[in-house]
Amino acid sequence: MVSAPLSSSDHRNDSKAKLRLWIRLLRASRLIEANVRERLKTQFAATLPRFDVMAALYRQRDGMLMSEISRFLMVSNGNVTGIVDRLVTERLVVRSQRDGDRRTSFVKLTGKGVAKFEDMAEAHEDWIDELLADLSVKDANNLSAKLKSFRSNWEGGA
């Protein structure tokens, strides 16, 4: 059996459906992010970029080069430098030179930083659970798998 090619009108409808999906994903992401930003600010006097830097360092307990943090978070070194400077001042991270090379800074969470991040991460998980409460675990897993599959198709893996 040979299927007929999509008519221009069918293609346009498919296109519109995908556009609506993208707008809904973007809107949901922005609303959730705004909510999380506000909660981080009010409950922890923290920003989302600060949380992201600490999360990256938490995943890499042995520490990371500043350039690795920038690459991981897909932001400029300048953005990361300002955040790390403040975290150093608050003794949440330590910064050192790698192999005595003054051009490369290596950053690692302190014990205080680990404890602070764990508090924020637990609250963050609770907030996301609350914000997505209407989504069943099964639906969350299915949607996550679909988005992961989609991501690997256009990003070339990962």
Image (cartoon, helix red, strand yellow):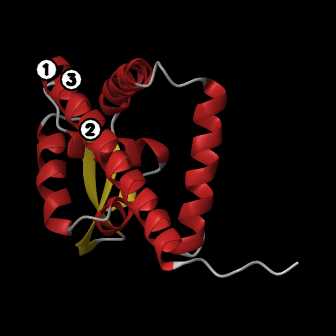
Q: Please say whether residue 61 is visible from this viewpoint.
A: no
Front-most of residues 27 and 111: 27
Q: Write down the residue under mark 2.
A: 33
**Residue that appears at 20% across and 35% down:** 34
Tell me whether circle 3 and circle 1 mark residues in contact (CB < 8 Å).
yes
- Quadrant where the N terminus is found in the figure: bottom right
Q: Position of 96 compared to 123: left or right?
A: left
> What is the x, y in percent for residue 146?
61, 51
> What is the x, y in percent for residue 63?
41, 52
Q: Please say whether residue 2 is visible from this viewpoint.
A: yes
**The disc labelled 3 sits on which kind of residue?**
Arg
Q: Is residue 114 above or below residue 82?
A: above
Distance CA(mark 3)–CA(mark 1): 5 Å
**Secondary element type, mark 1:** helix
Going from the N terminus, do you reach mark 3 or mark 2 first?
A: 2
**Residue that appears at 38% across and 42% down:** 55
Q: Write down the residue under mark 3.
A: 39
Distance CA(mark 1)–CA(mark 2): 14 Å
**The disc labelled 1 sits on which kind of residue?**
Thr
Going from the N terminus, do you reach mark 1 or mark 2 first?
A: 2
**Residue that appears at 53% across and 63% down:** 151
Distance CA(mark 3)–CA(mark 2): 10 Å
Q: Write down the residue under mark 1.
A: 42
- Outermost residue toward the right in this view: 1
Front-most of residues 110 and 134: 134
Q: Is residue 138 above or below residue 106?
A: above
